[in-house]
Image (cartoon, grey):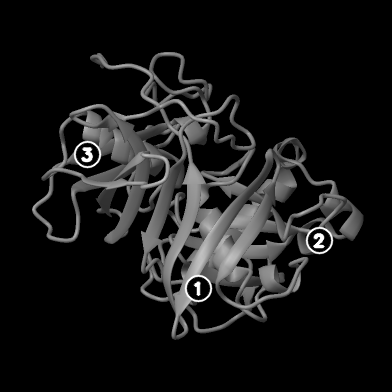
Amino acid sequence: MGSPDPYGRQLNGMGSGVSSTSKICVLAPTTRPDADVEFTFVQVGIRDGGLDMAGNCGNMLSAVGPASLELGLLSGSPRIETDAGTGNRTAVVRIFNTNTAKVIRSSFNVEGNPPRYRTQGDYAMDGVPGTGSRITLAFLNPAGAKTGRALPTGNIVDKLALEDGSTIEASLVDVSGPGVFVRAADLVGSMDGAETLTPAIVEADSRLKARLEMVRRAGAASMGLDPEVQSVPKIVLILPLGWEAGIDVRCLALSMGQAHKAVPLTLALCLGAAAGMPGTIPFMLRARGGGVGGRVVVGHPSGKVEVGTTVEDGEIQSAELDRTARILMKGNVFY
């Protein structure tokens, strides 16, 4: 991946100097009865070259089902569902993520015989140019992906004690992946400053970034996680809602110490679930009321993403969202 690189550009490798594109997916057949393929996610540290396997990645996960089919890695034949009205065929692949010990169901369009992933489609995502074939991901029983509980501390809101002696309120939630949710206004000191916060502003403010890292570390310790591990938990700033229509909750997330230009998908799923939990910070800053479950539109710096949560008898059964992916190349990487 071109790491370590003290200049943070990864010129001598496959990365591009940002955490979002410094990632590796390891796929393998499985003998598990509840899955068709196994997936291990590796986050590569840009500057230190460290390999972090503590968390999962929803964006990379979107490619796992189609790639597993294309590369012949499925343990058996994929389940194919045919729409009686349109004749469209959908493959359903069950993915076991070794990082979180959770199963994700990936559904995507196929064509031909034997079936192959159909890359062309009209589904568009904010922050991604062009359109593609829709991939639907359903994270099954996603609560407690790293901590064993949706609310690791048992509290809706915790008061975190920071290294500089100050405190801040945070909602610590673990659904699909752990997140530390804080009010942006509590960090920048005003609603106006919070409303106009952007990734560029965060990256240019070294004092704010240092304080955000303190919040992340305190949240990790409270959740029973290792504060030295950068990938989990991630910190999410909940911003005041501005003029955007149709957005339920607005956020700015950090990943591996960098302000994310969109939002990590596991965090979007976690935020969607948290926004339905009465009393959490995302719930209190949500535009429209509602309980656990249903669809939540998450606003992020590049647009918005809609996530869904299915709840039965008070338990989160699945968290869902839609993505696109396509195979860019096949070949050998020399290192």
Three-letter amino acid code of the residue under disc 2:
Ala
Compared across the picture, whether 22 is left or right of 187 comes to left
**Of residues 42 and 246, the one drawn nearer to the viewer in this rendering:** 246
| Mark 3 residue crowding within 10 angstroms, few (<14) / some (14–19) / many (20+) | many
Three-letter amino acid code of the residue under disc 3:
Leu
From this view, report whether residue 283 is shown above or below residue 251. below
Q: List the residue tagged with mark 3.
A: 27
- In the picture, the quarter occupied by the C terminus is top left
The residue depicted at 43 percent of the width and 54 percent of the height is: 228
Q: Is mark 3 on a helix, strand or loop?
A: strand
- In the picture, the quarter occupied by the N terminus is top left
**Of residues 332 and 310, the one drawn nearer to the viewer in this rendering:** 310
Q: List the residue tagged with mark 2.
A: 185
Q: Do residues under tags 1 and 3 come within 8 Å of each other at their CB atoms?
A: no
Q: List the residue tagged with mark 1.
A: 222
Residue 234 at least partly seen: no
- Residue that protrudes farthest toward the front in the picture: 85
Which of the marked residues, 1 or 2, is nearer the chain's N terminus?
A: 2
Q: How many numbered discs, if any?
A: 3
From this view, report whether residue 69 is shown above or below residue 32. above
- Between the C-alphas of marks 1 and 3, the distance is 33 Å
Quarter of the image for residue 170 reads bottom right
| Mark 1 residue crowding within 10 angstroms, few (<14) / some (14–19) / many (20+) | some
Q: Is mark 1 on a helix, strand or loop?
A: helix
Comparing labels 1 and 2, the label whose residue is closer to the camera: 2
